[in-house]
Image (spheres, rainbow, N blue to C red):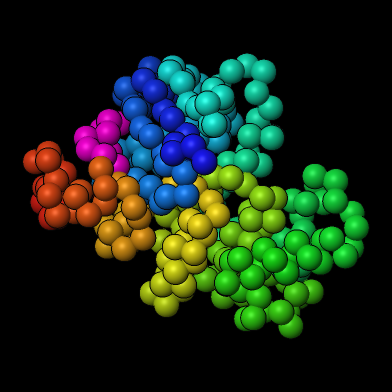
Amino acid sequence: MKKNKMLVRDLNLYYMDFQALKKINLDIETNRITALIGPSGCGKSTFLRVLNRMNDLIDGVRIEGSVFLDEEDIYRPEVDVVALRKRVGMVFQRPNPFPMSVYDNVAYGPRVHGIRNKNRLDEIVEHSLRSAALWDEIRDRLFKSALGLSGGQQQRVCIARLLAIEPEVVLMDEPSSALDPISTLKVEELIQILKQEYTIVIVTHNMQQAARVSDLTAFFLNGEIVEFSITDEIFTRPKDQRTEDYITGRFG
């Protein structure tokens, strides 16, 4: 297994004339959880969207540099972006289940990719919901609307929906910011389990969460990575004064 699942080299990103990301270099390790922290507007969510080309959907964005997934540059013109987003999936800040049953939410991706066999879909749905630590809670509600679930359950349905298409990298943009503390804990426990099979990159404004769940942490400030290291070192022995000022609450 390769040590690094993704590599980012000399990445600059511009919104029209504004430079939002500056000279980003980052190694994203296989089967590890990398947290991106920093104050609002520092570029961490923009950077996350770089990793599966979600910024392509925004007018006026220009990107320089390289992003490698298994040594292939995902910004080459011939790259199939749909196939890329199957390999590098995303969970958003607010739960966004489709207005359909739990079963149809989770089966949606596999159906789009051509799986029609009911027994196979049943297997995928159950496996994905088990992987999202949700099966035992909602196995009796599979054919009821996902919108009737609690916020925490909806977010785990969205995670199951992503797992059903068998991604290699899971991007999470503040996945528990809209959830209560108990649901947040369940999502954090789930993230720890998922890293056994997936490479995870999580943006969080909650520094306690970054300290609890991640193996590596990158501190962003004004579109730059100030410091990147093992999480324990970032939080207990930061090398840059700006990192220390941020994690001790002096700004941000």
- Locate residue 142: give its quadrant: bottom right
- Locate residue 127: give its quadrant: bottom right
Residue 224 is left or right of residue 148, and the answer is left
Residue 228 is left or right of residue 82, and the answer is left
Which residue is pictured at 64% across the width and 81% down the height? 136
- Check residue 114 for magenta coloring: no
| Residue lying farthest to the front in this orientation | 1
x and y percent of residue 16 in the render? 43, 19
x and y percent of residue 82 in the render? 69, 34
- Check residue 219 for magenta coloring: yes
Please state the extent of the stretch shown in magenta in the rendering.
Answer: 218-228
x and y percent of residue 224 in the render? 27, 30
Q: Is the residue 163 above or below the residue 184 in the image?
A: above
Which residue is pictured at 38% across the width and 47% down the height? 34
Of residues 95 and 209, which is closer to you in this image?
209
Which residue is pictured at 12% across the width and 40% down the height? 239
Q: Is the residue 76 above or below the residue 159 in the image?
A: above
